[in-house]
């Protein structure tokens, strides 16, 4: 049976959560109080993770599809399961579009987004063909690189001559209504709520006792890194200008250098996004593929993989025409009408139903 070590899950979750969040996932509407939204989102993210753990404990440590069947019955669970599969592939397509826009804007201005997306998706599809063990082990190797690079870049940002600590103040000037609007639903659902996809992978972890510990640590590390990166960006760019950049992390790195000899450290942000995007898309695509394998057992796996790849690629470009429309849909529509039902409402209903069944039994 396929098994994932706890340390591999840890690396997989950190790379997944940072994914596109550290490069394109910034919301500086609360300006100097972004640290409040970061920590509130982190706290709620930990709560969501334990909701998913509770779901698995009630569901006899099965995957999401099997838990849906325990709670909703055979036919309703199949419909909801297919919806989850399409949801995972759609989010994979959105992350792929984030990656394509980023690479196209920073590196290859004259290369079509279709070419970038197709090339990257081909690599992801091959990894999905190899299986989750290959993805998890790759993530562990890549984490050793990305973790060190992100930490070093943040330190270099703080010691940059362009960094001004006065730009981090004043704090507590944002009203709580505005803070909470930044936390809910966007801060809640991205990136922490996207851990719902791991409900397809948790049964493969070889150490269930360490699952909660490693999962919680990975979420906390991600939250701290996002907090430090957010403060670095503010100190370098300032609260008045930071909102004018689509990729503020990259812009901030343009103002840093290594010992004044190696400029253009923003190239490292490309590598970080490349690795994070690869892991995130792979996890979403593989989980969607698993759902379709469970829902359509008579169809060969290779055909389902090709179909899943096609759905991901089509959803990348059909549902939004440009980066402005893409960001609007991702920040205003998807969190409220897709993330909340799939990440919060359905899991909470499942926990409630399974808890009642366990109590009655």
Image (spheres, rainbow, N blue to C red):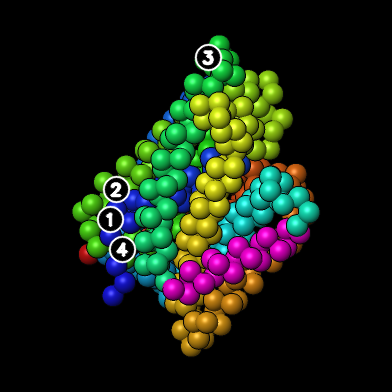
Rendered location of residue 281, percent (x, y): 53, 59
- Using a 10 Å C-alpha cutoff, classify the residue at mark 2 as few (fewer than 14 neighbours), some (14 to 19) or many (20 or more): some
- Disc nearer the start of the sequence (3/4): 4
Query: Does residue 141 appear anywhere in the picture?
Result: yes
Where residue 170 appears, as percent x and y from the top left, is: 55, 11
Residue identified by numbered label 1: 6
Q: Residue at x 66, y 50 (%)?
A: 103
On the image, numbered disc 2 is attached to which residue? 214
Label located before the other in sequence (3 or 2): 3
Q: Is residue 32 visible?
A: no
* Marks 4 and 1 close (CB-CB < 8 Å): yes
Q: Which residues are magenta?
A: 112-130
Single out the mark in the foreground, 3 or 2. Answer: 3
Front-lying residue, 76 or 117 = 117
What SS does tag 3 mark? helix
Work out how far the residue at label 4 is from the one at label 2, CA to CA, in angstroms: 13 Å
Q: Residue furthest bottom?
A: 298
Comparing labels 1 and 3, the label whose residue is closer to the camera: 3
Q: Main secondary structure of the magenta part?
A: helix
Left/right placement of residue 327 relative to residue 32 reads right
Identify the element where label 1 is drawn: helix
Please say if the residues under marks 2 and 1 sit with CB atoms less than 8 Å apart: yes
Taking 282 as reference, is 312 left or right? right
The image quarter containing residue 319 is bottom right
Q: Earlier in the sequence, mark 2 or mark 1?
A: 1
Which quadrant holds the C terminus? bottom left
**How far is mark 3 from mark 4, CA to CA?**
43 Å
Which numbered tag is attached to residue 20?
none
Circle 3 sits on which residue? 165
**Label 4 sits on residue:** 4
Residue drawn 56% across the image and 18% down it: 161
Q: Are marks 3 and 2 in contact (CB under 8 Å)?
A: no
């Amino acid at each position: 049976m396929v098994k994932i070590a706890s340390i591999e899950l840890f690396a997989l979750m950190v790379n997944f959560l940072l994914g596109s969040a550290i490069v394109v996932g910034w919301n500086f509407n609360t300006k100097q109080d972004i640290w409040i939204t970061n920590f509130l989102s982190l706290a709620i993210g930990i709560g969501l993770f334990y909701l998913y753990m509770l779901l698995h404990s009630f569901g006899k440590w099965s995957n999401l599809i099997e838990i849906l069947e325990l709670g909703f019955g055979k036919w309703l669970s199949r419909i909801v399961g297919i919806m989850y599969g399409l949801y995972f592939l759609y989010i994979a397509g959105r992350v792929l579009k984030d990656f394509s826009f980023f690479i196209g804007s920073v590196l290859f201005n004259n290369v079509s987004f279709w070419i970038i997306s197709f090339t990257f998706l081909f690599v992801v599809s091959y990894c999905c063909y190899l299986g989750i063990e290959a993805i998890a082990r790759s993530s562990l190797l890549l984490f050793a690189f990305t973790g060190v690079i992100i930490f070093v870049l943040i330190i270099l940002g703080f010691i940059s001559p362009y960094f001004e600590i006065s730009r981090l103040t004043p704090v507590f000037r944002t009203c709580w209504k505005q803070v909470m609007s930044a936390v809910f639903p966007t801060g809640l659902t991205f990136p922490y709520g996207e851990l719902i996809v791991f409900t397809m992978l948790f049964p493969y972890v070889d150490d269930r006792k360490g699952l909660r510990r490693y999962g919680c640590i990975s979420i906390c590390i991600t939250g701290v890194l996002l907090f430090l990166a957010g403060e670095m960006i503010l100190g370098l760019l300032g609260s008045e200008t930071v909102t004018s950049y689509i990729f503020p992390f990259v812009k901030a790195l343009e103002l840093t250098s290594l010992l004044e000899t190696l400029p253009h450290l923003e190239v490292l942000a490309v590598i970080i996004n490349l690795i994070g995007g690869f892991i995130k898309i792979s996890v979403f695509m593989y989980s969607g593929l698993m759902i379709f394998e469970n829902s359509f057992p008579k169809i060969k796996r290779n055909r389902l993989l090709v179909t899943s790849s096609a759905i991901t690629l089509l959803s990348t470009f059909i549902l939004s025409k440009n980066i402005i429309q893409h960001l609007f849909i991702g920040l205003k529509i998807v969190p409220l009408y897709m993330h909340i039902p799939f990440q919060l409402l359905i899991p909470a209903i499942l926990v409630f139903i399974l808890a009642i069944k366990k109590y009655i039994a």
